[in-house]
Amino acid sequence: MTQQGALDALKFLAAEGHGQLGAVLGRLRSVAVKQGSEAELETAIDLVRQFRGLAVELASRLCADAHDFNHYSDGRQIQTSVEIEPGCRLDYRWFPDPADPANQPRTLVERHVCANGRQVSVVVSAPGILDVVGADRPPMFIDAPAEGDADA
């Protein structure tokens, strides 16, 4: 792995850790509200915050471009966010290798039912691009032979 590849992998790890720890914090807060055991959960939340801060600090020390944890060395965004419906967002972190299968066209969320009853899907339309499409229409990236294709 090249030095740039290693730095991009570290940036991905920092972004993924930040996102996952954010989800953990949200769940811990939810449990605290439901169970009323705020003291123990506040301790757990503080530990998660400390770990998150340590991870970001160490990553920034190791990266030459420490001030930019939003882009890979080639300029691509590390994370993309799309609004599925008002108040509901999906954050997707792109793998450092542009050719990774996780960065290629595919469906991420199939048939999310919105508050208004509309059904939508979230798709990777192309590397680095997320789209929200109506679930009644198939994504355009489906690789199928064209009508009349001799190989079909």
Image (tube, rainbow, N blue to C red):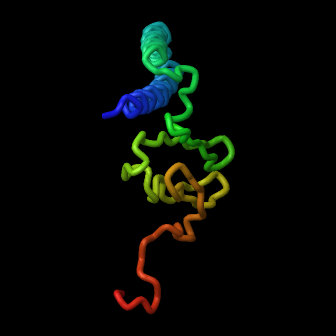
- Residue 58 in sight here: yes
Q: Nearer the viewer, residue 56 or 89?
A: 56
Note whether 80 is above or below 109 in the view shown. Answer: above
Q: Nearer the viewer, residue 102 or 60?
A: 60
Query: How many numbered marks have been drawn onto this rendered protein structure?
Result: 0
Quadrant location, the C terminus: bottom left
Outermost residue toward the left in this view: 1
Image quadrant where residue 41 sits? top left
Q: Nearer the viewer, residue 92 or 87?
A: 92
Note whether 31 is above or below 41 in the view shown. Answer: below
Note whether 90 is above or below 21 in the view shown. Answer: below
The residue sitting at 56% across, 52% down in the picture is 130
Residue 150: x %, y % from top left: 37, 91
Quadrant location, the N terminus: top left
Residue 103: x %, y % from top left: 44, 50
Outermost residue toward the front in this view: 2
- Residue 45 in sight here: no
Q: Nearer the viewer, residue 107 or 7?
A: 7
The residue sitting at 37% across, 49% down in the picture is 100
**Quick check: 62 left or right of 111?**
left
The residue sitting at 46% across, 21% down in the picture is 63
The residue sitting at 39% across, 32% down in the picture is 9
Image quadrant where residue 6 sits? top left
Residue 145: x %, y % from top left: 41, 81
